[in-house]
């Protein structure tokens, strides 16, 4: 299929970076479409670790074109820093990395408001990444966000920034008791960025449209996950963009097309970073085992991730809301060594069994997950390269999940390296 959307099925950190890198070798264009530097996608190639926050991990493939789409909020400092890090690692991006003129910019006051809002919420804080993402989208919706294209005209940029900053300074000083931010300082800082980032600016939506018409293959790299979606996730404990598949199209500026491969990326267990309901969370030694073996520490903030058994209720919901065509099961090797393995097929609460995802977060906090329990495996599966190489108990786990979800698991990741992957069905 000419278009493949990679979408996280849970609360992010499903291993999308590695899968995008893997699929990227057969794509022509790889695009990020929403979110910003709150994402952290890790890829390991020949022992070298690359961490991406804004740039699609597909950039590691020489000659592939990468795009930061319309729906993103871009922190110019983080963007330029990422390019610099990539250059140091021998990855040249010139001529094959483009950013949307319509994407919004993360401004210094966005990061401040992110911090102040969290403090204001107190016990009800979201546990954001602190990258200013929510406040940047808030300004976009309020229609006084500053876009990449605004950097082109010095005078109108100055006028816009002055008007916005006056209001922001009022809030910062009167409500949060923070010293006033200097217009001159921010203006000079962003003019400096303008010089460096404007050469990357194009009409990415038109570029993607043209690429599709030329028969090129496009891979849309979703960030975060379905359960963090602003509309479809565990609101209010969500991010401020639309990580679902339809949000990817919106953020790319691509209209609805027939025949899209929508690949759900699902970890063999579930994790969550930040606050909010997580019915299958394990606060015991198994949770610790998964966190340590799976190196479940945030790639953006370093925070330890909460870990638990695979949540099949959330998974089925994600398959429905994204219309997933198949699934990639990641980090399967991490489950090795556990004598028993579980996955949740329903929640129990208020006198009934719930197979559909319930939206009352108070219910989610108190429900009891119902588990299917299987025998584990002792073997190290990281060198398996075909389905037949996997132990019988591992195959049984995979097939039990397939029985639950009703779509095929087309890809299985058994280790962090690019090659540590089993393909059961080709996607392109
Ligand atoms: P924000 O996106 O920084 O506003 O954070 C909102 C929520 O989304 C918090 O719970 C974050 O921990 C979570 N979040 C944001 N980006 C990611 C990600 O890339 N992986 C996992 N969680 C994320």
Image (cartoon, grey):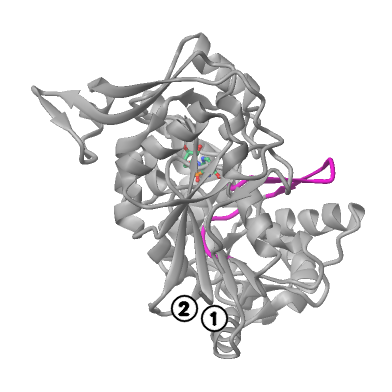
**Which quadrant of the view contains residue 416?**
top right
What residue is rendered at 41% in x and 75% in y? 259
Q: Quadrant of residue 378?
A: top right
- In the rendered view, would you say 34 is above or below 278? below
Q: Which mark is residue 254?
A: 2
- The 10 Å Cα crowd at callout 2, few under 14, some 14 to 19, many 20 or more, is some
Taking depth in this image into account, of 405 and 178 the one nearest to the observer is 405
Q: Residue furthest top?
A: 285
Q: Quick one: 151 or 211, which is closer to the camera?
A: 211
Residue pointed to by mark 1: 205
Q: Please check the rendered image and state whether residue 33 is part of the magenta-colored stretch, yes or no.
A: yes
Q: Nearer the viewer, residue 168 or 152?
A: 152
Query: Do tag 2 and tag 1 residues touch (Cβ < 8 Å)?
Result: yes
- Lateral position of residue 384 relative to residue 258, left or right: right
Q: Position of residue 99 (x, y in %)?
A: 66, 72
Residue under the image location 43 percent in, 17 percent down: 282
Crowding at dot 1, Cα within 10 Å, few <14 / some 14-19 / many 20+, comes out as many
Query: In the displayed structure, does residue 302 sit left or right of residue 371?
Result: right
* Residue 156 on the magenta span: no
Q: In terms of sequence position, does the residue under pointer 2 or pointer 1 come before the other?
A: 1
Q: Position of residue 232 (x, y in %)?
A: 31, 51
Residue 29 spot, x, y in % from top left: 65, 73
Q: Under tag 1, what secondary structure? A: helix
- Specify the quadrant that holds the C terminus: bottom right
Query: Within the image, what quadrant is residue 365 found in?
Result: top left
Residue furthest out toward the left: 351
Stretch in magenta: 32-52
Q: Is residue 53 visible?
A: yes
247 over 407 or under it: above or below: below
Residue 203: x and y in percent read: 60, 83
- Image point 79% across, 66% down: which residue? 192
């Amino acid at each position: 299929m000419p278009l493949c959307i990679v979408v996280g099925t849970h609360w992010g950190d499903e291993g999308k970076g590695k899968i995008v890198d893997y699929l990227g070798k057969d794509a022509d264009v790889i695009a990020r479409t929403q979110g910003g530097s709150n994402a952290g996608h890790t890829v390991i190639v020949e022992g070298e670790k690359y961490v991406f926050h804004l740039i699609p991990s597909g950039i590691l493939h020489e000659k592939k074109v990468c795009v930061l789409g319309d729906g993103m909020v871009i922190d110019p400092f983080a963007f330029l820093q990422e390019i610099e890090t990539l250059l140091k690692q021998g990855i040249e991006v010139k001529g094959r990395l483009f950013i949307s003129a319509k994407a919004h910019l993360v401004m210094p006051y966005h990061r401040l408001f992110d911090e102040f809002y969290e403090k204001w919420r107190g016990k009800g804080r979201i546990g954001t990444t602190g990258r200013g993402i929510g406040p940047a989208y808030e300004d976009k919706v309020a229609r006084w966000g500053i876009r990449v294209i605004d950097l082109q005209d010095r005078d109108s940029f100055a006028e816009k920034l002055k008007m916005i900053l006056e209001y922001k300074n009022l809030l910062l000083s009167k409500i949060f008791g923070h010293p006033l931010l200097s217009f001159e300082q921010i203006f000079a800082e962003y003019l400096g960025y303008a010089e460096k980032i404007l050469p990357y600016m194009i009409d990415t939506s038109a570029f993607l449209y043209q690429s599709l018409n030329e028969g090129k293959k496009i891979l849309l790299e979703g960030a975060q996950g379905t359960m963090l979606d602003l509309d479809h996730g565990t609101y209010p404990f969500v991010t401020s963009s639309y990580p679902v598949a339809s949000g990817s199209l919106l953020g790319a500026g691509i209209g609805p097309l027939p025949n899209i491969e929508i690949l759900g990326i699902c970890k063999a267990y579930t994790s969550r970073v930040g606050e909010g309901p997580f019915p299958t969370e394990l606060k015991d030694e198994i949770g610790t085992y998964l966190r340590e073996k799976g190196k479940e520490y945030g790639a953006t903030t370093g925070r330890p991730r909460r870990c638990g058994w695979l949540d099949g209720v959330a998974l089925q919901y994600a398959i429905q809301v994204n219309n997933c065509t198949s699934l990639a099961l990641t980090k399967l090797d991490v489950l090795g060594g556990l004598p028993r393995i579980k996955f949740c097929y329903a929640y129990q609460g208020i006198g009934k069994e719930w197979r559909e995802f319930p939206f009352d977060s108070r219910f989610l906090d108190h429900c009891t997950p119902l588990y299917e329990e299987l025998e584990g495996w002792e073997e190290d599966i990281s060198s398996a390269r075909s389905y037949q190489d996997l132990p019988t108990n591992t195959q049984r786990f995979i097939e039990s999940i397939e029985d639950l979800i009703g779509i095929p698991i087309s890809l299985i990741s058994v280790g962090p390296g690019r090659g540590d992957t089993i393909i059961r069905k080709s996607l392109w």
